[in-house]
Image: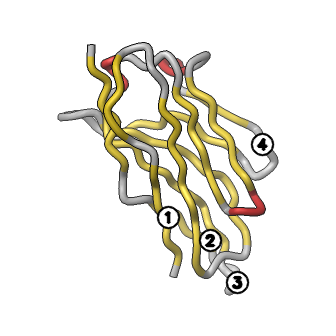
Amino acid sequence: QVQLVESGGGLVQAGGSLRLSCAASGNIFSINTMGWYRQPPGKQRELVASITRGGSTNYADSVKGRFTISRDNAKNALYLQMNSLKPEDTAVYYCKAAVQRWTGTISDYWGQGSQVTVSP
């Protein structure tokens, strides 16, 4: 069993900052690519940023230059530093991890979601 637990969401004014964290635990041999996704109200879930185990990153155009994704492989942790937040960043944010278990199988796991609300 693998669990991803998120923390750090909340309410912030436009221009402010928030930092999301995601901690993975359970039957984990290693974690490959990790990512943050978000689902705005009434819209589909979309990729925000992803990071490989080696540290290569990828960002959605809408967050480039404002958000920074990072990870700590020793702690099985994922982070998202969000600066210069805009009202359109309001969404439920989810972490996702491609986890290889000790059995050798690789599966995707999702966090429970963390609400981020940016007021004008």
**Earlier residue among tags 3 and 1:** 1
Query: Which label sits on residue 4?
Result: 1
Bin the neighbour count of mark 1 within 10 Å (Cα to Cα): few under 14, some 14-19, many 20 and up: many
Bin the neighbour count of mark 4 within 10 Å (Cα to Cα): few under 14, some 14-19, many 20 and up: some
Could you say whether the residue bearing mark 2 is in a helix, strand or loop? strand
- What is the three-letter code of the residue carrying label 3? Trp
Q: Is residue 69 left or right of residue 10?
A: right
Q: Position of residue 113 (x, y in %)?
A: 36, 52
Closer mark to the observer between disc 2 and disc 3: 3
Badge 3 is on which residue? 102
- What is the three-letter code of the residue carrying label 2? Ile
Q: In whole angstroms, how far apart are the C-alphas of marks 2 and 4?
A: 19 Å
Q: Nearer the viewer, residue 5 or 36?
A: 5
Q: In whole angstroms, how far apart are the C-alphas of marks 2 and 3?
A: 9 Å
Badge 4 is on which residue? 55
- What is the three-letter code of the residue carrying label 4? Gly
Q: Nearer the viewer, residue 50 or 114?
A: 114
Could you say whether the residue bearing mark 1 is in a helix, strand or loop? strand
Could you say whether the residue bearing mark 4 is in a helix, strand or loop? loop
Could you say whether the residue bearing mark 3 is in a helix, strand or loop? loop
Q: Is residue 64 left or right of residue 8?
A: right
